[in-house]
Image (spheres, rainbow, N blue to C red):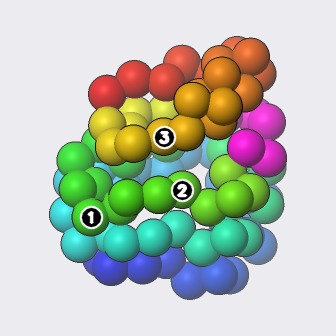
Amino acid sequence: LESLPDSIGNLTSLNELNLGYCHKLVSLPERFGECKSLTSLDLQQCTSLVSLPERFGELTSLRYLLYCNYMPATLKVQLENQGCYVGC
């Protein structure tokens, strides 16, 4: 899996998504931030994923994120302030 379609933003009732170990995943679409019901996201070992979309911080229901790559400190603080556990 190298990418997700933009239409993933249409999945407004999506609760959990496990993309862990998708080593070829390069990016997440900008519309990923529209998955407003997402509570759990596993991105561990997505070694080709080097950045998150600008709208990632709009995932206000996110409570559990596994992501081991670089994340801007401001985004991490924002997610943690929303009650999200950010781990590796």
Residue 31 occupies quadrant: bottom right
How far apart are the two marked residues, 1 and 2, measured between alpha carbons? 11 Å
* Region rendered in magenta: 57-62
Q: Are marks 3 and 1 in contact (CB under 8 Å)?
A: no
Q: Are marks 3 and 2 in contact (CB under 8 Å)?
A: yes
Q: Residue at x 54, y 56 (%)?
A: 52
How far apart are the two marked residues, 3 and 2, measured between alpha carbons? 8 Å
In the image, residue 59 lies in the stretch drawn in magenta:
yes
* Marks 3 and 1, the one that precedes in the sequence: 1
Q: Residue at x 66, y 22 (%)?
A: 77
Check disc 1 and report its element: helix, strand or loop: loop
Where's residue 58, x and y in %?
A: 79, 47
Query: Residue under circle 3?
Result: 71
Prevalent SS, magenta region? loop
Q: Is residue 21 left or right of residue 73?
A: left
Q: Does residue 12 sit above or below 72 in this rendering?
A: below
Of the numbered discs in the image, which one, if any, rests on residue 48?
A: 1
Q: Is residue 70 left or right of residue 55?
A: left
Check disc 2 and report its element: helix, strand or loop: loop
Query: Which residue sits furthest front?
Result: 73
* Marks 3 and 2, the one that precedes in the sequence: 2
Judging depth in this view, the residue of 67 and 17 nearest the camera is 67
Q: Residue at x 33, y 79 (%)?
A: 2
Q: Does residue 22 sit above or below 10 in this rendering?
A: above
Query: Residue under circle 2?
Result: 52
Residue 88 occupies quadrant: top left
Where's residue 62, x and y in %?
A: 66, 34
Check disc 3 and report its element: helix, strand or loop: loop
Q: In the rendered image, is residue 64 in sight?
A: no
Where's residue 20, x and y in %?
A: 29, 50
